Image (spheres, rainbow, N blue to C red):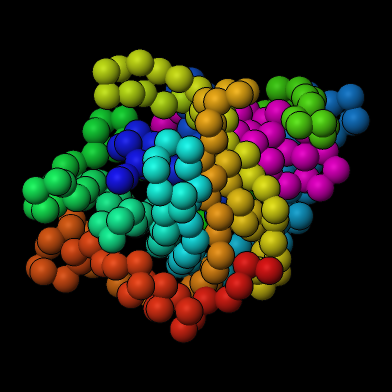
Amino acid sequence: MKLPSNQIAVLAFAACMAAGPSAPVLAQGTAQESAAGQGSEHGLSAAQIVEKNEAARGGVDAWRKIQTMVWVGHVESANVAVSTLPFVLELKRPNKTRFEITALNQVAVRVYDGTNGWKLRPTRGGKPDLQAYTPDEQKFAHEEQVIDGPLIDYQAKGIAVSLDGLDEVEGNKAYRLRVKLPSGASHHVWIDARTFLDIKYDRETRSVIGQTATISVFYRNYQNVEGLQIPATIETGLGTGQPKNRLVIEKIALNPPLEDWRFAKPGTQGRNEAVSIGGASQATRETGRPAR
């Protein structure tokens, strides 16, 4: 049993963004648009909110030092019969990602080398099915700001941030920021008005038959990992009352050695086939630290 392809994509994307939460949806904008925004009812501009968010997450200088990151955990999903699905997420600057998820001793892999992406999935016949990313997946992967997200060093990345308003998210006041990437892609991210940590973003997804839907992603249970604030639980869902998927991060490794071949097309040179969760977990246990 395995998650449907679009569910794997959403979970992988949410996990990548949790290192520096946020995700793109379609819109227009330029890097020169003001990050100061309009003053909120609390008197804070977008630039001031981002500055407080950077400080709350551990500081810009600390995040700049992180070049690689590995997460080990499990997925809890109401969409499959298996109660928990182990996963390993590997991230490397500037935007390399590798996401492995295991179900019934079979491993599905999503990997992006910074330019191209591939999906390797098990089949009933036992022969792995390797496919290139769809255009939508390719676009999202290319626009990901892995490791630290779009708000850290946003000006250096050519990103514009504006304040859209003050909302209530699950009983908490939260600033709604619009983040516009150099490509013109845009999305909303909500910053808790008390802690100034990211607590939510909305992401548009497309099914294999072309239908679009908005998926809400919530960041919960922030943990201190060597001075950085990182959410230990990421929850995704299509709306109120709908089944939720939850990523639970059990271990986090900062700056472990990750060779570029880990992010190459699966099967290339016989070195980067999908690996078992046991092997990846063991490597992380040797270099990682609990996310608490």
Q: Position of residue 60 (x, y in %)?
A: 66, 59
Q: Position of residue 276 (x, y in %)?
A: 29, 67
**Magenta segment, principal secondary structure?**
strand
Is residue 13 on the magenta stretch? no
Residue 227, picture quadrant: bottom right
Is residue 193 on the magenta stretch? yes
Image side of residue 249 versus residue 85, left or right:
right
What residue appears at the point 82 percent right and 34 percent down from the top-left corner? 172
Nearer to me, 103 or 40: 103
Nearer to me, 158 or 135: 135
Relative height, residue 287 to residue 101 (above, below): below
What residue appears at the point 55 percent right and 25 percent down from the top-left corner? 242
Q: Which residues are magenta?
A: 174-201
- Please identify the quadrant where the C terminus is shown: bottom right
Relative height, residue 259 to residue 164 (above, below): below
Residue 261 seen in this snapshot: yes
Residue 81, picture quadrant: top left
Q: Position of residue 42 (x, y in %)?
A: 90, 30
What residue appears at the point 55 percent right and 59 percent down from the top-left corner? 249
Q: How many marks?
A: 0
